[in-house]
Amino acid sequence: MTTKNPFNASQLWEKICEYAKKGGRLSTRPLLLLYYVMTSPDTPGRDKWLIGAAIGYVVLPIDLLPARKLPIIGWVDELVSVSFAFEKCRKYVTAEMERKADEQLDKWFPENTAFTEVTE
């Protein structure tokens, strides 16, 4: 029995693009890697659900601890959700996914490209 994936990858991608403008390169990279893992056919369904929930929680306007009302504490729940999903699913990250994420980040943040090349 095949389970239908309720996540719309293109809509989620649009939300990640919006988030990238606000979040910056460093905080967007794990989201991109999780997105690529989620869209991979090699990732098990339950891990795709976990990733979709974590990314959705960060990029959608739903928030348990609102960052506007609790400036520093408000980011903790997003950080925890992405960190948990990333740690659980990092074994699925391939070199190709890392390359794609870095190329996308270079497009979004061209001013940081020279800095990352020097520091790597």
Image: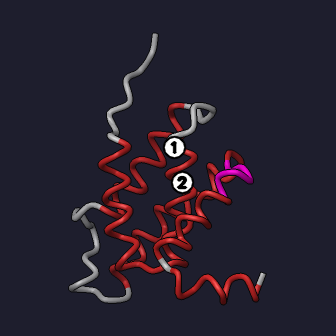
**Residue at 73% in and 82% down:** 117
Q: Position of residue 27 (x, y in %)?
A: 50, 75
Specify the quadrant of the image occupied by residue 83.
bottom right
Membership of 77 in magenta stretch? no
Residue 24: which disc? Answer: none
Farthest residue in the top direction? 1
**Residue at 57% in and 86% down:** 112
Pointers 1 and 2 in contact (C-beta within 8 Å)? yes
Task: Name above or below for residue 70 compared with residue 104.
Answer: below
How much space separates mark 1 and mark 2, taking CA atoms? 6 Å
Give the residue type at disc 2: Leu
Q: Tell me if mark 2 has few (under 14), some (14-19) or many (20+) residues whose alpha carbon lies within 10 angstroms of its own.
A: many
SS class, disc 2: helix
On the image, numbered disc 1 is attached to which residue? 38
Q: Position of residue 102 (x, y in %)?
A: 62, 67
Q: Position of residue 47 (x, y in %)?
A: 54, 40
**Residue at 35% in and 79% down:** 22
Residue nearer the viewer, 103 or 55: 103
On the image, numbered disc 2 is attached to which residue? 34
Membership of 96 in magenta stretch? yes
- Left or right: residue 56 versus residue 38 is left
Q: Position of residue 56 (x, y in %)?
A: 34, 55
SS class, disc 1: helix
Magenta-tinted stretch: 93-98
Quarter of the image containing the C terminus?
bottom right
Residue nearer the viewer, 88 or 18: 18
Residue nearer the viewer, 27 or 62: 27
- From the image, give the main secondary structure of the stretch colored magenta: helix
Give the residue type at disc 1: Met
Task: Name above or below for residue 60 compared with residue 88.
Answer: below
